[in-house]
Amino acid sequence: MTVIENNLETGRNSRPALVKVWDIAVRMFHWSLVFAFAVAWLSADEWDRIHELAGYFIAGLIAFRLVWGIVGTRHARFSDFIVGPTTLINYLRDSLLHRAKRYLGHNPAGSAMIVALLLSLIVTTVSGVAMTSNAFWGIDWVEEIHEASATLTLVFVFLHVAGVIFSSISHKENLIRSMITGKKKPL
């Protein structure tokens, strides 16, 4: 049902100022991951136990997000926002030309960033867990993969934040606030 059809059914003759987009599970996942990754990054090489606990917490968050990406609410599901490379390239081109389409859920660049972040976090957590096992204890290449993937994740975080700021300015909406409240302006 479209917003207009819903308005007619409810007797409203105007569009709502905001619509619910991000459910509480997506928002809690997002901000918990931000916090846990910051703790893991800051505790690396200094506080092993805190670092490991943050890593296990991140692994649990990733597992949750993978499940929620299949069974969650509309805009949380991967099927709602995963796009092909052509759509992504066209969106990025249109963004640079300041004519990109506005999306209610994740835009194609956000979609690509979610995939990139999840993959880099999976590699980081799997390699981190491997480093604590007897089979991979003290193996240099496992530690190098762990550190490289953690650094790559941090690069993705900076790109994500830059993209959110760029998109917020371009579409004249506060995407950070929408990830706190769960609401955005309707299309």
Image (cartoon, rainbow, N blue to C red):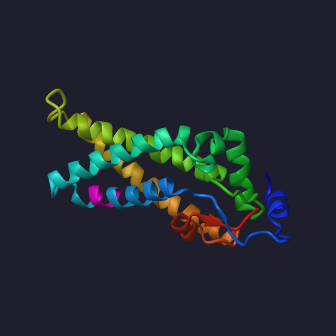
Q: Quick check: is 9 in the magenta stretch?
A: no
Visible residue check, residue 149: no
Q: Outermost residue, top direction?
A: 135
Describe residue 62's horizontal placement relative to residue 24 as left or right. left
Total number of numbered discs in the rendering: 0
Name which quarter of the figure residue 143 lies in. Answer: top left
47 or 139, nearer to the observer = 47
Query: Which portion, as a residue range, is magenta?
Result: 37-41
Residue at (15, 58) in percent of width and height: 46
Describe residue 77's horizontal placement relative to residue 1 as left or right. left
Residue at (44, 58) in percent of width and height: 28
The vertical placement of 155 against 89, above or below, is below
Q: Which quadrant does the C terminus fall into? A: bottom right
* Coordinates of residue 101 in the picture (x, y in percent): 76, 57
Residue at (41, 50) in percent of width and height: 153
Name which quarter of the figure residue 102 lies in. Answer: bottom right
* Coordinates of residue 96 in the picture (x, y in percent): 70, 61
Visible residue check, residue 154: yes
3 or 82, nearer to the observer = 3
* Coordinates of residue 161 in the picture (x, y in percent): 51, 63
* Coordinates of residue 67 in the picture (x, y in percent): 47, 38
Residue at (84, 57) in percent of width and height: 5
54 or 117, nearer to the observer = 54
The vertical placement of 56 against 187, above or below, is above
134 or 59, nearer to the observer = 59
Overall secondary structure of the magenta stretch? helix
